[in-house]
Image (cartoon, rainbow, N blue to C red):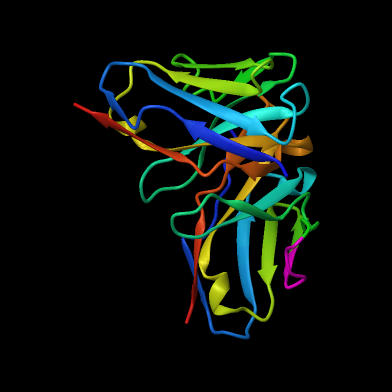
Amino acid sequence: QVQLQESGPGLVKATETLSLTCTVSGASTNTYYWSWIRQPPGKGLEWIGRIQYSGSTTYNPSLRSRVTISMDTSKNQFFLKLSSVTAADTATYYCGRRQWQGLVDIWGQGALVTVSS
Amino acid sequence: SYVLTQPPSVSVAPGKTATITCGGNNIGSKSVHWYQQKPGQAPIPVVYDDSDRPSGIPERFSGSNSGNTATLTISRVEVGDEADYYCQVWDSSSDYREVFGGGTKLTVL
């Protein structure tokens, strides 16, 4: 059974960098693509970006200047860094396994990150 | 950038059929996925590649996609189907991003 678990600070100060880790169990990060998606409170889903098992990344153009996704296949983890955060970055952040044609078939439970001023 | 448009809300009585649309330019040429999200939970896929169902999803959930509109249909709606539903595509025609619709709140009256 494939499971994903987000972890990281739940509170980040404005202008600092948000950092999250997604730990994968039951599957190898040496295969598939792996995605980050976020959801501001009471709002819809926003795709942040994805990383391929080769390390190749694709980002949402609206966040590209501030986002870095990386991975450590030896630990079966992938990571999200979002720099220069503001209150608008307050959201639940989900990691997921991306399948063919963009389907995210497995999601983590989500991690709420609040940006404080 | 590619935009997906969903109605903010749909209401239906138990036992009836709910239809949720997802509009996009020539969306019929793309594979559409649908997710269900209940309060406090992560989304789960209920239809993928326009009309396929993941294992464990009831046959009551079905999908179609043609022209500029994709549709999620829920037959014999149950109270437990009340949730937010999101459509999603992979925009391979431009910058290869994933795109989500704004979501539809399904209320079971």
Q: Nearer the viewer, residue B65 or B79?
A: B79
Q: Is residue B50 above or below residue A114?
A: below
- Residue at image position (64%, 40%) is A3
- Residue at image position (71%, 46%) is B27
The spot of residue A100 in percent (x, y) is 79, 36
Q: Quadrant of the N terminus of chain B?
A: top right
Bounds of the magenta segment:
B56-62
Q: Nearer the viewer, residue B85 or A79?
A: A79
Please tell me in which quadrant of the rendered image residue B54 appears. bottom right
On whether residue B35 falls in the magenta region, the answer is: no
- Residue at image position (55%, 48%) is B101
Q: Residue furthest left?
A: A117
The spot of residue A7 in percent (x, y) is 47, 30
The spot of residue A104 in percent (x, y) is 67, 41
Q: Nearer the viewer, residue A24 or B4?
A: A24
- Residue at image position (50%, 60%) is B38
Q: Is residue A38 above or below residue A72?
A: below
Q: How many marks?
A: 0
Please tell me in which quadrant of the rendered image residue B65 appears. bottom right
On whether residue B61 falls in the magenta region, the answer is: yes
Question: Can residue B105 be spotted in the picture?
Answer: yes
Q: Is the magenta region chiefly helix, strand or loop? A: loop
Q: Nearer the viewer, residue B22 or A50?
A: A50
The spot of residue A43 in percent (x, y) is 40, 48
Question: Can residue B93 be spotted in the picture?
Answer: no
